[in-house]
Amino acid sequence: MSGNTQIVESFWLARPSTRVAPDLLGCSLVRKFPDGETIRAMIVETEAYGPFDPACHAYARRTPRNEAMFGPAGRIYVYLIYGMYHCLNVVTDADGVASAVLIRALQLDAVPQRFSHLPEKARSRLASGPGKLCKVLEIDRTLNGLALGTGEGLRLEHRSEEFQQAIESGTINIVQTSRIGISQGIDLPWRWYIGNYPAVSKF
């Protein structure tokens, strides 16, 4: 795997969400704001959603709300929960197949200045949940359906070589378990996270 400067290609994402989700761990999301501020964060927790999955938003039918899930791969699917929290998903699989990976938690490379007053523990968990990370990165429905890395201020980069080597050597442990915060499909082991990272939303 190449270094963090290599942007993830859409064809790499055009695989089932259950294959992409664990491979996204260690990749970086980079958010660039109009004023030039940039936030870089490593993905440390993901969940997969796909066809024939009762927890998937597109399980029943195709609607204007879930349209972005049907592709093509590499687009962004953003939805709102509880009327106040946005959730970021990376669309995967073949064009026309409803499939996406929910980004559940991020570990920030550096804490933005506006959060520097917070206690250390709070700073380490600024993006420890799908709603929290969208708040920090200022992600909302205006990004829904857009392609990653097309000048809209959000791109996805591959794991570093060092991170990949750490996985292969067993230095970094990836945990697979059931998804959380859902009422259907709770038995499917489609959640992955990196062990011992403070930003993981729930162990």
Image: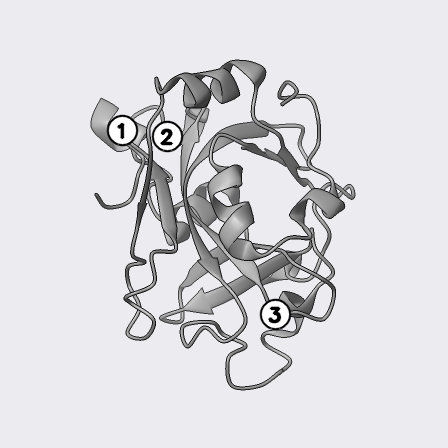
Pointer 1 with pointer 2, Cβ within 8 A? yes
* Alpha carbon distance from label 3 to label 1: 39 Å
Tell me the SS state at disc 2: helix
> Badge 3 is on which residue?
98
Q: Residue at x 29, y 67 (%)?
A: 186
Name the spot of residue 62 as percent of width and height, x first: 62, 82
Query: How dense is the environment of label 3, judged by Cα within 10 Å: few (below 14), some, or many (20 and up)?
Result: many
Query: How dense is the environment of label 1, judged by Cα within 10 Å: few (below 14), some, or many (20 and up)?
Result: few
* Alpha carbon distance from label 3 to label 2: 36 Å
For marks 3 and 1, the one nearer the N-term is 3
> In front: 65, or 119?
65
**Residue 71 vertical placement versus 11 (above, below):** below
> In front: 161, or 68?
161
> Badge 1 is on which residue?
118
Tell me the SS state at disc 1: loop
Tell me the SS state at disc 3: loop
Q: Indicate which label's residue lies in the foreground, 3 or 1.
A: 3
* Alpha carbon distance from label 1 to label 2: 6 Å
Name the spot of residue 150 as percent of width and height, x first: 78, 44
Query: How dense is the environment of label 2, judged by Cα within 10 Å: few (below 14), some, or many (20 and up)?
Result: few
> Badge 2 is on which residue?
115
Quadrant position of residue 192? top left
Q: Residue at x 52, y 39 (%)?
A: 24
Amino acid beneath label 1: Leu
Amino acid beneath label 2: Phe
Quadrant position of residue 1? top right
The residue most toward the front is 169
For marks 3 and 2, the one nearer the N-term is 3
